[in-house]
Amino acid sequence: MTRHDFTSRGYECNGVICNGVEIKARYGVISDAGARNTFGRLLPPQVSAMQVNPLIAAGAFEPSFQLVYLFVGLDTDDQSLNLPATNLWVVNGWNHDEQWDALDQASSIDDLDFLPVVFISFGSAKDKGFRELGGNGNANLQLLAPVRMEWFQNPKWEGTKVQRRGQEYQDEKEKWRDRLLEYLYEQFPELRGHVTFTNVATPLTTKFYLNAQWGENYGLAQSIARFQLPTQLFLHTETEVKGLFMVGQDTSFVGVLGVLGSGALAASSLSKRAAMGLYMEMVLSRGTE
């Protein structure tokens, strides 16, 4: 949690408290926990309200979508199986809005006879180092599919840890394994009989490892409201709380570039030397193009 004081200038964040140990910050505190955790859990309600209430009113504080992952190991190398070194998006149709609306309204996967999209990524085929090391004659790939956290809300699983959720949860994961494998075999029927390893991760897995309370993968939802100017001002790296800075996808946009950019902005806000260094680096890099 953050260490904070009320001063004559208002609320000020000047350190953190971790496991009872207080760590004071000379320049400020930088949070990479995401907007929902930073403002919703690390700050007292009377302080977080001034940052959260405008976002809620604008409809920009909703979590992003949730995913089920399937990790697949194969007993043959990529070249022998002729696997592409690309990503594949398998869409169910071209009316994306209609299909995503159906997903949002479904109380369980049984209400749908489709998934709007399934993403397939061929990790080992894209990894030159894996191929150079031989890969032990194996290959691997990953599948991702959008789901709803509500589908995995079971009182028996609430607050449980990985590998401690019981047989009912394992049965649910096996259903998703079989479902996603069928999507894989539809695109690559030659892979039947070559799958030697599978592992499924659900939004509960994401919640456990990333502390994302709704199992979301990308922080705040990437909605139109999220990118309106007033919302962007409230999600700036320099927050409304003096001494508290935020980095990560919620301050800009998802992806590596968005996260890197937020780090540069936060560093520039904290240190004039860092700001000058970043400026000089940009100038010098342009001169070498």
Image (spheres, rainbow, N blue to C red):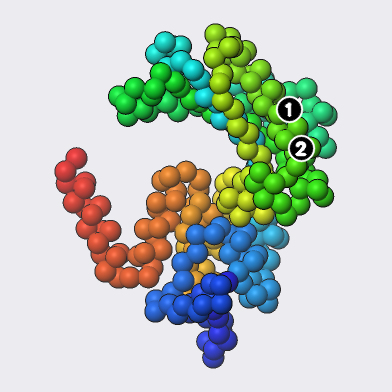
CA gap between label 1 and label 2 equals: 12 Å
What is the x, y in percent for residue 261? Answer: 40, 53
- Residue lying at 18% horizontally and 51% vertically, measured from the top left: 284
**Is residue 161 in view?**
yes
Q: Secondary structure at mark 2?
A: helix
Q: Residues within 10 Å of mark 2 (few under 14, many from 20)?
A: few
Quadrant of the image containing the C terminus:
top left
Q: Position of residue 247 (x, y in %)?
A: 47, 59
Residue 51 drawn at (x, y percent):
61, 68
For label 1, the SS is helix
Query: Residue 153 got which mark?
Result: none
The quadrant in which residue 94 appears is top right
In this view, the residue in front, 99 or 122, is: 122
Identify the amino acid type marked 1: Lys
Q: Is residue 79 depicted above or below 213 in this figure?
A: above
The label shown at residue 175 is: 1
Which part of the image, by quadrant, shows the N terminus? bottom right
> Which residue extends farthest top?
190
User: Mark 2 highlights which residue?
Assistant: 167
